[in-house]
C-alpha cells in the first residue's frame, strides 16, 4: 500500500533492552521525521533527516539513534530503553521545500517500557 | 523558530463557527503560519498554511492581519467529528523542521 507505515504498532519492552521502530514511506519524500507524544507535552521532535545519509537532532534526541541508508526507510532505535521513553512515536515524511511543505504522519507506534 | 501561543482548550457546539486564535509576536518576514489537526490515536494532519490576509480551503479558513502577529483558524459549522487538537505553527523559510507546541484541544458538544 502507498503511504507511510510504521511497525510495530504496539510494543512492550523491558528496561535496558534495545528496540527499533520502523518507518517506511512510498512517496520518495526527501524529508523524514520522528516525534514522540506524551500526555501534557504535545509532539516533540526527536530526529529528522533531509535526505538519505543526512540526519540531524531535534528537541529530544538523547537515548535515540537514527539512520537513513535508503530514502524510504527511517528506523529509530532506542539503545537502552528507559521507562521515560514510554510514549507514542510518530514518523512523518515531507517532499516539498520549506516553507510550503506538508508533513504526512504515520499511524504511530505505542511503546511501553516496563 | 518563532514561538506561538494558543488556548489550551475550547468547547463549542455542533453547527457553530469556531475560531481559534494563535499569537506569534516574534514572527519573521519569511515565516509562514501553518495549522495541523490531530484526532485521537492518529498522527497530525496538515490543514492550512498562509502568509498574509486570508486563505481558504475545503476544511478551514485562515485569517492573518497585516502585522502578522496573530492568526485565526476558522472552522465553519463544526460537527462532533471536528473534536481534535489543533496546532498552530510558524515555519521559517529556511527551516527544514517544524516544532509542535501543545495545541488547542477543541471539544465539540452536541
Image (cartoon, helix red, strand yellow):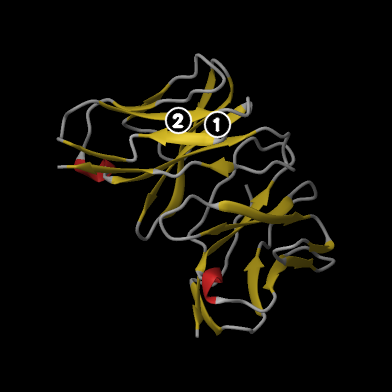
Q: Are marks 2 and 1 in contact (CB under 8 Å)?
A: yes
Asked which secondary structure carries label 1, the reply is: strand
**CA–CA distance between discs 2 and 1?**
9 Å
In the picture shown, does residue B100 fall above or below A106? below
Image: B12 above or below A35: below
Please indicate whether residue A22 sits to the left or right of residue B59 in the image: left
**Which is more N-terminal, label 1 or label 2?**
2
Q: Residue at x 52, y 75 (%)?
A: B80
Q: Disc number at residue B38?
A: none
Q: Nearer the viewer, mark 2 or mark 1?
A: 2
Q: Mark 2 sits on what residue? A: A23
* Horizontal and vertical percent position of residue A36: 40, 44
The residue most toward the front is A1
- For disc 1, the chain is A
Disc 2 packing (10 Å; few <14; some 14–19; many ≥20): many
Read off the residue under disc 1.
A32
In the picture, which quadrant includes the C terminus of chain A? top left
* Picture quadrant of residue A29: top right
Does residue B58 lie above or below A46 as drawn?
Answer: below
Point out residue B65 in the picture as x, y percentages from the top left corner: 81, 69
Residue B46 lies, with reference to residue A2, above or below; the image says below
Q: Chain of mark 2?
A: A
Q: Secondary structure at mark 2?
A: strand
x 77%, y 61%: residue = B57
Label 1 packing within 10 angstroms: few (<14), some (14-19), many (20+): many
- Left or right, A22 with reference to B69: left
Amino acid at each position: 500500500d502507498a503511504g507511510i507505515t510504521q511497525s510495530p504498532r504496539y510494543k512492550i519492552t523491558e528496561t535496558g533492552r534495545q528496540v527499533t521502530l520502523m518507518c517506511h514511506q512510498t512517496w520518495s519524500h526527501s524529508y523524514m521525521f520522528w516525534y514522540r507524544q506524551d500526555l501534557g507535552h504535545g509532539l516533540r521532535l526527536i530526529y529528522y533527516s533531509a535526505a538519505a545519509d543526512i540526519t540531524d537532532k531535534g528537541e529530544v534526541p538523547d537515548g535515540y539513534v537514527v539512520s537513513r541508508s535508503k530514502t524510504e526507510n527511517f528506523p529509530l532505535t532506542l539503545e537502552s530503553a528507559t521507562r521515560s521513553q514510554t510514549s507514542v512515536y510518530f514518523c512523518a515524511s515531507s517532499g516539498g521545500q520549506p516553507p510550503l511543505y506538508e508533513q504526512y504522519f504515520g499511524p504511530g507506534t505505542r511503546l511501553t517500557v516496563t | 523558530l518563532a514561538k506561538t501561543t494558543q488556548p489550551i482548550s475550547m468547547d463549542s457546539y455542533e453547527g457553530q463557527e469556531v475560531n481559534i486564535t494563535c499569537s506569534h509576536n516574534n514572527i519573521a518576514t519569511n515565516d509562514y503560519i501553518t495549522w495541523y489537526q490531530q484526532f485521537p490515536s492518529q498522527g497530525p494532519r496538515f490543514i492550512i498554511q498562509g502568509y498574509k490576509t486570508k486563505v481558504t480551503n475545503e476544511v478551514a479558513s485562515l485569517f492573518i492581519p497585516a502585522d502578522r502577529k496573530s492568526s485565526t483558524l476558522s472552522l465553519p459549522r463544526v460537527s462532533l467529528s471536528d473534536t481534535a487538537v489543533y496546532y498552530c505553527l510558524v515555519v521559517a523559510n529556511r527551516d527544514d523542521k517544524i516544532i509542535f507546541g501543545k495545541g488547542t484541544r477543541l471539544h465539540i458538544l452536541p
